[in-house]
Amino acid sequence: MIHELGTVGMVCPFPLIEAQKKMATLSSGEELKIDFDCTQATEAIPNWAAENGYPVTNFEQVDNASWTITVQKV
């Protein structure tokens, strides 16, 4: 199951903080799709996922200043 988290408009580090909170509520195997527009989160979220052993199953730039990333909880 994919859960969605919209953090567009939030300044860093709030997209990462909200992602951490939401991920804590998910079960193993579930995915979290995070939409964001904070440039710093393009590094912070993938780094957090890697540090926690969470695979990134999708990461793409939606437009000039907007991204989406999907992280799986293991």
Image (cartoon, rainbow, N blue to C red):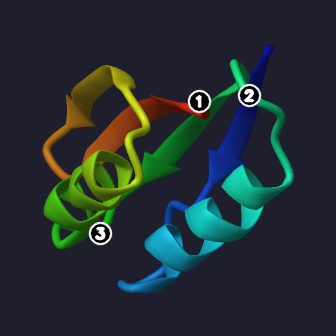
The amino acid at mark 2 is: Ser
Quick check: 41 left or right of 69? Answer: left
What residue sits right under mark 3 in the picture? Answer: 38
**Which element carries disc 1, helix, strand or loop?**
loop
- Check disc 3 and give the amino acid type: Cys
Which type of secondary structure does the marked residue at label 2 adopt?
loop
Q: Are marks 2 and 1 in contact (CB under 8 Å)?
A: yes
Please indicate whether residue 9 sits to the left or right of residue 47 in the image: right
Residue closer to the observer: 29 or 12: 29
Residue at mark 3 to residue at mark 1: CA–CA distance: 26 Å
Q: What separation in Å lies between label 2 and label 1 (alpha carbons)?
A: 5 Å
For discs 3 and 1, the disc positioned in front in the rendered view = 1
- Look at 27% across and 27% down and name the residue there: 59
Q: Which residue is mark 1?
A: 74
Residue beneath the point at 15% across and 60% down: 43
Where is mark 2, residue-wise? Answer: 28
Q: Residues within 10 Å of mark 3 (few under 14, many from 20)?
A: many
Q: Residue at x 73, y 23 (%)?
A: 30
Percent of width and height locating residue 22: 75, 58
